Image (tube, rainbow, N blue to C red):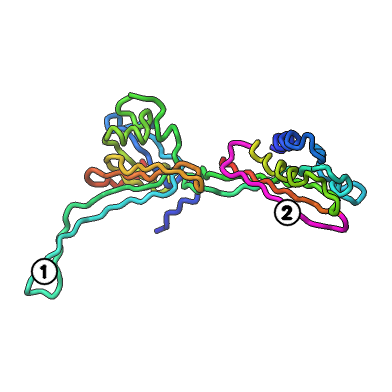
Amino acid sequence: MRDTLLTQITTNLAGSNVKVSSELPFNNGGEVLYMKNKKHFYLDAEQEAREEFIKCLDKNDIEQTTITLNGYLTVDAKNQPGDISNVVANILSANSAITNTIDNSAGVTTEIENDAITYTFEFNFITII
Amino acid sequence: MAVINVSAGSEAVLELYDLDANSAITGNALTAPYLQDITITNSTGVFRWQTLDSTSESAAATPATNQVSLNLVVDDAAFFGTGSNVDPGVVENGIFGISNAKTEIGFRAYFDGTDSGSKYVEGTGFISGLAPTVNPGAPVWVTPVTIEVNGDYTEAEVA
């Protein structure tokens, strides 16, 4: 799922001012990569949560799985790329590449620290097992 | 004296079988999968009347209405059957096929599993009340099922 989403984001951001990294947003020398490498989008590893959807007497319960992926992009807060609105929209719309879900959502929040603004994306994909 | 609980997952069991083959005994019955709940209703009818010489009503029993109602998550093999036009097999025609054909079937509702000594209620009847439904908020097909029982129940114990 991460690979599919990352491929779609890479396609959507082709020609923009933002590059897509396939690396996980790990810490390097005490600083996370997306803070260090501005204008690079990083997609974190999948987080999976399972919960009961329908309980059955024969214990063949129907479960739903929620897979969450977080993405990060940091740019200069004062001089953001001119296409930042399109970049954000294109990252969010990449969620349509994931199919066979019963719920598929994406959202973004921002946080400013010093002279940098970090866009934190959250993708949620829910499937039934 | 003991309560009957269904914590093990193999205790509240409903089997449907063909009347001609008596397949509940031969092992060719359809065990209803993904059973969400089951209710066995034995509703005895009552006729009441009043007389001037009594301050209380009198009553007499009339024939009972017997029903087994349940809710299932739709399983394709159980609902549509494993094959077609194999009259009157419950397994082959599935719950929908049996209902659509209005075929009388037998059923056994086990209270605490199918092991020796377990109690069950048995009878014959017709499948009714199918209403498969699905929506975006509950994206798995589920359906109510009613067995309109023909005659009395038989209460017995697994040999």
Q: Considering depth in this image, is B74 or B63 the residue closer to the camera?
A: B74
Instruction: Let me know if marks 1 and 2 both belong to one chain.
Output: no
Q: Residues within 10 Å of mark 1 (few under 14, many from 20)?
A: few
Q: Is residue A105 magenta?
A: yes
Residue A76 lies in the magenta-colored region: no
Q: Position of residue B117 (x, y in %)?
A: 39, 46
Three-letter residue code for mark 2: Thr
Marks 1/2 in contact by CB < 8 Å: the verdict is no
Residue B89 marker:
none
Residue assigned mark 1: B50
Span highlighted in magenta in the image: A98-115
Residue B109 or residue A112, whichever sits in front: A112
Residue found at the far front of this picture? A82
Mark 2, other Cα within 10 Å: few <14 / some 14–19 / many ≥20: few
Residue depicted at 62% across the width and 47% down the height:
A50
Describe residue A66's horizontal placement relative to residue A90 as left or right.
left
What residue sits right under mark 2 in the picture? A109
Label 1 secondary element = loop
Residue type at numbered disc 1: Gln
Report whether B14 appears left or right of A45.
Answer: left
Q: The C terminus of chain B appears in which quarter of the rendering?
A: top left
| Residue drawn at the location 39% of the way across and 59% of the way down | B1
| Cα gap from disc 1 to disc 2, whole angstroms | 74 Å
Q: Residue furthest right?
A: A29
- Residue A13 is situated, as x and y percent measured from the top left of the image, at 76, 37
Kindly report the secondary structure that dominates the magenta region of the rendered protein: strand
Residue A109 spot, x, y in % from top left: 73, 54
- Residue A11 sits in quarter: top right
Disc 1 sits on a residue from what chain? Answer: B
Res A23 → quadrant? top right
